[in-house]
Amino acid sequence: MSGEADTAKILTRVNELFENNPGPFEGGIMETKEEIREARAEIHPITEWVRDPQGFFTIYPNAEREEIVAEHHDSEGKMKSRIFGKSAEDIYHHIINNNLVSRHDHAAYLGRELTKAELAMRNSLDYEQDADLKIMKANIEQIREPVVPREPEISRPLPPKLPERKIERKGTGRFLTYIKGGREIALEDFTRQDNEFRGLLRERGMSRVF
């Protein structure tokens, strides 16, 4: 009775079933095995690509506006519209809802490319349509102040205190930062908690790399 909202009808049916209760099941256990079909996806040759009658798209991230741009062209190559969005999901829903794509393979392709563009935008990576997204792990070295052994206390005057050294952050690659209290803070440590926090920031698009 899924979907039935009439309480009286539901209670009537409950009473009918209660009166006809057959009692505990006395049979044995019957084992059933469901066959699960497995298949290996075949390599799809590029030569099988078929143009969508609704046209094609050029996709690129706009770092200044922090948006993804999808330009829709008709089958003759004339640009018909330009779509802006903060996420891949927003853009492909707009494309589907406005009937700008008619082939399933084209829709799957757009989902892949828009996701790549979003990842590139959120992580300051280079994006090129139809090319693999190159992701490199930042290798940041933490520079620490050298430990100077203390001299034993003597009666002679101590030497003048040296000015404090300014520690410069060095390293190769890029620095991941996040915003806290209106300030930009760099993540430089390599503890487990830092790595988990870094991953959380990347997933939610709350960080940037410079």
Image: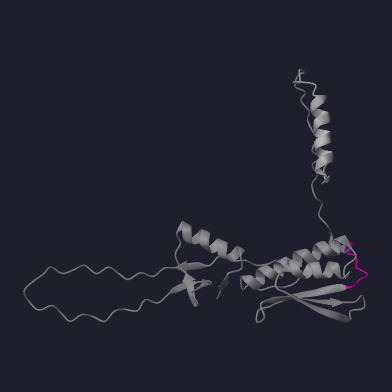
Question: Which residue occupies 19% across, 68% down?
Answer: 150
Question: Which residue occupies 90% across, 65% down?
Answer: 102
| Residue 207 percent across, percent down from the top left | 56, 70
Magenta span includes 204? no
| Residue 11 percent across, percent down from the top left | 80, 37
Q: In this view, does 103 lie above or below 1?
A: below
In front: 77, or 181? 181
Q: In this view, does 56 lie to the left or right of 184?
A: right
Magenta span includes 51? yes
Q: In this view, does 169 lie to the left or right of 86?
A: left
Question: Which residue occupies 61% across, 65% down?
Answer: 204
Total marks in image:
0
Quarter of the image with the N terminus is top right
In front: 201, or 144? 201
Q: Give the range drawn in magenta.
A: 48-55
Q: In this view, does 83 lie above or below 147?
A: below
| Residue 110 percent across, percent down from the top left | 80, 66
Kindly indicate the quadrant of the structure image that contains residue 114: bottom right
| Residue 72 percent across, percent down from the top left | 84, 76
Q: Is residue 131 among what the camera can see? A: no
Kindly indicate the quadrant of the structure image that contains residue 113: bottom right
Question: Which residue occupies 90% across, 76% down?
Answer: 74
View extreme (front): residue: 8
Quarter of the image with the C terminus is bottom right
Q: In this view, does 49 lie above or below 31?
A: below
Q: Is residue 53 among what the camera can see? A: yes
